[in-house]
Image: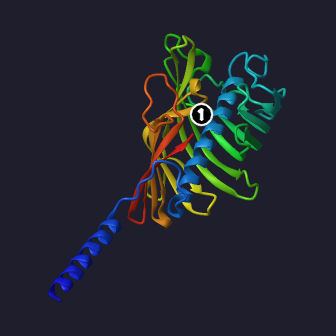
Amino acid sequence: MKARQLIILIAIIVTSFGLTFQGCKKSKTTDQTTNDKTTSLQQLTNDENKAENNSDEAMNDVNSVLSPGGGLKSAQFIPCNATVDSAVVHDTILTFYIRYHGYNCNNTKIITGNIEISKNVNVNWHVAGATVLVKFIDYKVVRVANGKSMTFNGTKTFTNVSGGFIWQLGFPGHPAMIEKVTGSILVTFDDNTTTKTWNIARQRTLTRTVTADSVPHLVLTIDGFGSDAGYNNLVFWGVNRNGENFYTQINQSVVIKEACSWDPCSGVELFTIPGASKSATVTFGYDSNNDPVSGDNCPTRYRIDWTVNGQSGTFFLPL
């Protein structure tokens, strides 16, 4: 009888230990998870990556047509499957439009809609501190790979902090071009029912580098300089498609390479959804095996270290 009671007691202790250990165990995954706790974090990081990619491509187009020999005077710098209207001057404001109607130059996106560029006639884009207004009008980007779309409406202030033109990069005296983008946009996601306002405070540093193929490519380094609700170094903040307020800070400059289809290749961002006690640290620069990339290799995935109500874990998502 005593032996039987001893066996039962041991079983209870072992079971209790196992449950305690399981309850404290850190949740870990190595791929996309359907865990309800992280769904909105996954969606937010994916949405923002796509928004940044689409936005940067558009601002690069604006940069090109503002350059000498650009869209107003030559077809050389006009985006593929786009036209640039002749400039119209009203009072002291010069306005022209980039009108999109097809594939981008590397056939990865289908772009429609318009971008309106307005500047004072006395403002020369190459002068340090020059500012233009960039208005997105039903600017819709559809990714060919998956058919997912994103549409922008809203106005950004685009400032040439350093001065110079993008084509001068790499020439003596022009190692980098620094720009700032501020404003807010309405983002309509691919379900065509969810429109949210996102605030923007992005510093763009453009340089040019020669990769292994001996071709000079642009490199874009992104930093955040916005502040709101006690958060600093913000690059984006607003409301995600789940109706949650979010804040995205750049903790380590995000490096985006033209040679890698303008995908982020390194850097660290911190996403916070305070109302739901959720956060995620996103680290860019991983390959399909979830290993860090090196050299001129282009990444295909990024890492998310998440925390939700005291629980945490890690998984990887495709770019």
> Which residue is depicted at the point 28% across and 75% down?
16
User: In the picture, which quadrant includes the N terminus?
Assistant: bottom left
> Which residue is depicted at the point 57% across and 19% down?
217
Q: Is residue 64 shown left or right of residue 204?
A: right
Seen from the viewer's position, the closer of residues 233 and 132 is 233
Q: Is residue 52 shown left or right of residue 100?
A: left
The x and y percentages for residue 207 are 52, 22
Looking at the rendered structure, the kind of residue marked 1 is Thr
What secondary structure is marked by label 1?
A: strand
The x and y percentages for residue 23 are 35, 68
Q: On the image, numbered disc 1 is attached to which residue?
A: 159
The x and y percentages for residue 229 are 47, 59
Asked if one can make out residue 232 in the rendered structure from this viewpoint, the answer is: no
Q: Is residue 78 shown left or right of residue 11?
A: right
The x and y percentages for residue 90 are 82, 35
Q: Eyeballing the image, is 62 above or below 309? A: above
> Which residue is depicted at the point 81% across and 32% down?
102
For mark 1, does the 10 Å Cα neighbourhood hold few (<14), some (14 to 19), or many (20 or more) residues? many
Q: Eyeballing the image, is 15 above or below 250? A: below
